Each structure stands twice: as structure tokens, then as C-alpha cells.
Image: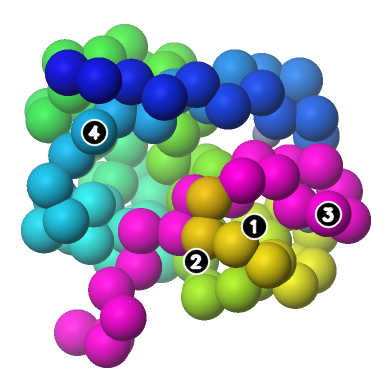
Amino acid sequence: MTVQKLACQACKGEVRVPELSMAERETIALLRTTETPRAIDAIMTLTGWSLQDSKRLALHLTTARGMCQGCRGALSERMGRCGHCGSVNIDWLPDTPA
Ligand SMILES: [Zn+2]
Ligand SMILES: [Zn+2]
């Protein structure tokens, strides 16, 4: 599995981003908006990663399009660091809400 690594300036952690299918990414993103523990479980199941790595990824997923999960500032791209707080943001949300 290809893994992308992003350094977060807000929590000083390294966020690992697995290469998953769009359906898998969207499922995880939607779980994250309501039940973060279930999103973490889904990541662990799909990747076989530790709780720590899975949780770190889950916490950096955005819960609303274009809004930083850290400072709630506006984001300019779907994956990258927030220009306001330096937090890593990964937007896996579907284009049309389910
Ligand atoms: Zn962070
Ligand atoms: Zn931010």
C-alpha cells in the first residue's frame, strides 16, 4: 500500500495517508463527521495500522468542505497544511453529501 506522509505543524506529528479507493475514503470521511471512533476502526481494518497511526489520520480528516479541522479557518486545497494554523487537513468528503 502506498503511503503519503505529511508533517503537521500544529501537533508536530507525522500524518500517514494510505492510498485507498474513493469509496473507502468517502466512507471513512463520513464516519469522521459523526463518529470519529468508527472512522478510526475503519482505518485500522482497511490498513492494518496501529491505533495511534489510524487515530492521527482520522483526526486530520476535515469534517466540512473547505474548513480546517484545527482552527476552522478556510482551506485552499483538499489535502495539505492550513495556511492559518499549519495543521494538516485531508478532505475525503464526497462531492455530493450522502
Ligand atoms: Zn496535527
Ligand atoms: Zn487551521
Query: CA–CA distance between discs 4 and 3?
Result: 24 Å
**Mark 1 residue element:** loop
Upstream in sequence: badge 4 or badge 1: 4
Its colouring scheme is rainbow
Check whether the beta carbons of the residues at disc 2 and disc 1 lie within 8 A of each other. Answer: yes
Label 1 beta carbon less than 8 Å to ligand 2: yes
Check whether the beta carbons of the residues at disc 2 and disc 4 lie within 8 A of each other. Answer: no
| Outermost residue, right side | 84
Q: Which kind of residue does numbered mark 4 sit on?
A: Glu
Query: CA–CA distance between discs 2 and 4?
Result: 19 Å
Q: Which kind of residue does numbered mark 2 sit on?
A: Thr
Q: Position of residue 52 (x, y in %)?
A: 44, 16
Q: Position of residue 71 (x, y in %)?
A: 80, 59
Label 3 beta carbon less than 8 Å to ligand 2: yes
Q: Which residue is under mark 3? A: 83
Q: Nearer the viewer, residue 78 or 68?
A: 78
- Rate crowding at label 3 as few (under 14), some (14 to 19) or many (20 or more) other CA atoms within 10 Å: few
Q: Which residue is under mark 1? A: 69
Quarter assignment of residue 31: bottom left
Query: Is residue 95 one of those drawn in magenta?
Result: yes
**Measuring 64% from the left and 57% from the top, which residue is drawn there?**
69
Q: Which mark is residue 19?
A: 4
Query: Is residue 13 one of those drawn in magenta?
Result: no
Q: Which kind of residue does numbered mark 3 sit on?
A: Gly
- Rate crowding at label 2 as few (under 14), some (14 to 19) or many (20 or more) other CA atoms within 10 Å: many
